[in-house]
Amino acid sequence: MNENNRLIEAFKQTNYQVAGNGIRDIQVLKEALRNYEGHQESDIYGKGKIIEDFQKKMAEYLGKEDAVFFPSGTMAQQIALRIWCDHEGVSKVAYHPLCHLEIHEEEGLKELHHIEPVLLADKSRLIQFEDVVNMGEGVACLLLELPQREIGGQLPDYQMLEAISAYCHEKGIKLHLDGARLFEILPYYKKSAAEICELFDSVYVSFYKGIGGIAGAILAGDKGFTKESKVWKRRYGGDLISLYPYIISADYYFNKRINKMKMYHEEAKELAGLFNQCHGISTKPVEPVSNMFHVYINSPKEKMESILIDIYEKTGIGLTGYLREIEAEACFYEVSIGDQFGNIPKEGLIKVFQMLDESMKKIKE
Ligand SMILES: Cc1ncc(COP(=O)(O)O)c(C=O)c1O
């Protein structure tokens, strides 16, 4: 067994796991279905109470005229950008070089729609107001991802968001929100979802990140926009005859976890603080602004895997099941806090970080 497999195996054997909402097994759906009667009608091709009620609920929550349920955010966002490009009669959008569309979607936007992206900012930082002002002519839509996942989940300050929104509005550039983790940032901004979404023409949110559902996304905007998005959903093959397993789980876990986001944020700050006290370890951002952050470790990946396995075996507490190499001498991984953090015995957690710090000190010697 290589180190990578050993780490994930050791992680799976732990009694407590620091991040996430628990194992993504079939129980996730079974729990969500618990209160449903078997004879309840399913949705059919985007129609029916189950889908329409949820769409209405999310439109209200996001403060938008209308909302459409999609099987995935990938599908919803490519469609949103295509609609805005068609409106403007240009095929150019702007976004961050590490946004989901650019690095995780196999060039879907370019291959399927021939839309050209303008990459704003460099990979290591957030998009600033100046980047938007300097992005050049002919951009139909600017996509902002809040928080910017690939750089640890960082956020611009709210005044910057307002300034970007006002500028786009003035210049006739549509502003789209990749809000895969929108719910998770509300406690930091101390704003409602509707207040933040008001700054944007269209919004996507996800139900399987902090919310912890199975899959699924909502795309929201004005009625003309959502009507067009339904046509594209059909063209994409996303208008499944029934989407209710995703909708029921999205609704169930939204209700279960939406009010826990503040707690997850506080816990993320607590955990990041523990990492930052360890030799050779730091988090990005230093103080998390949501339930997520990245952990940077000044140690070769293989060495760190052995250290973590030893800690897991001795404490029964697991920090992560994977590490990614950055360079020969450093690695990192992502943390997203969910329900599991609250279950960890405090003494156990202190022990984990004592052991981690001791091991890191030895590496440095
Ligand atoms: C920031 C961001 N945008 C979009 C997506 C796409 O979501 P989906 O997996 O539903 O296609 C993800 C998924 O990880 C994401 O993290």
Image (tube, rainbow, N blue to C red):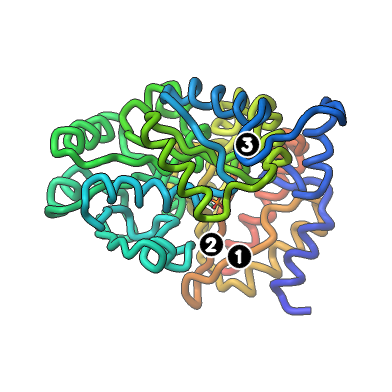
Amino acid type at mark 1: Leu
Secondary element under disc 3, as helix, strand or loop, is loop
Is label 1 or label 3 in front? Answer: 3
Image quadrant containing the C terminus: bottom right
Residue at coordinates 69% horizontally, 55% vertically from top-left?
Answer: 355
- Which of the labelled discs sits on residue 35, or is there none? none
Label 1 vs label 3: CA separation?
24 Å
Secondary element under disc 2, as helix, strand or loop, is strand
Amino acid type at mark 3: Ile
Q: Is mark 3 within 8 Å of ligand 1?
A: no
Q: Which residue is mark 2?
A: 332
Q: Position of residue 210 (x, y in %)?
A: 60, 39
The answer to which of marks 2 and 1 sits earlier in the sequence is: 1
Residue at coordinates 25% horizontally, 59% vertically from top-left?
Answer: 118
Question: Do tag 2 and tag 3 residues touch (Cβ < 8 Å)?
Answer: no
Left of 194 or right of it: where is 24? right
Q: Position of residue 72 (x, y in %)?
A: 56, 49
* Residue 288 visible from this viewpoint: no
The answer to which of marks 2 and 3 sits earlier in the sequence is: 3
Q: Position of residue 156 (x, y in %)?
A: 32, 39
Q: Is residue 118 above or below residue 84?
A: below
Q: Which residue is mark 1?
A: 323
The answer to which of marks 1 and 3 sits earlier in the sequence is: 3
How would you rate the neighbour count of disc 1 (Cα within 10 Å): few for under 14, some for 14-19, many for 20 or more? many
Label 2 vs label 1: CA separation?
6 Å
How would you rate the neighbour count of disc 2 (Cα within 10 Å): few for under 14, some for 14-19, many for 20 or more? many
Question: Do tag 2 and tag 1 residues touch (Cβ < 8 Å)?
Answer: yes
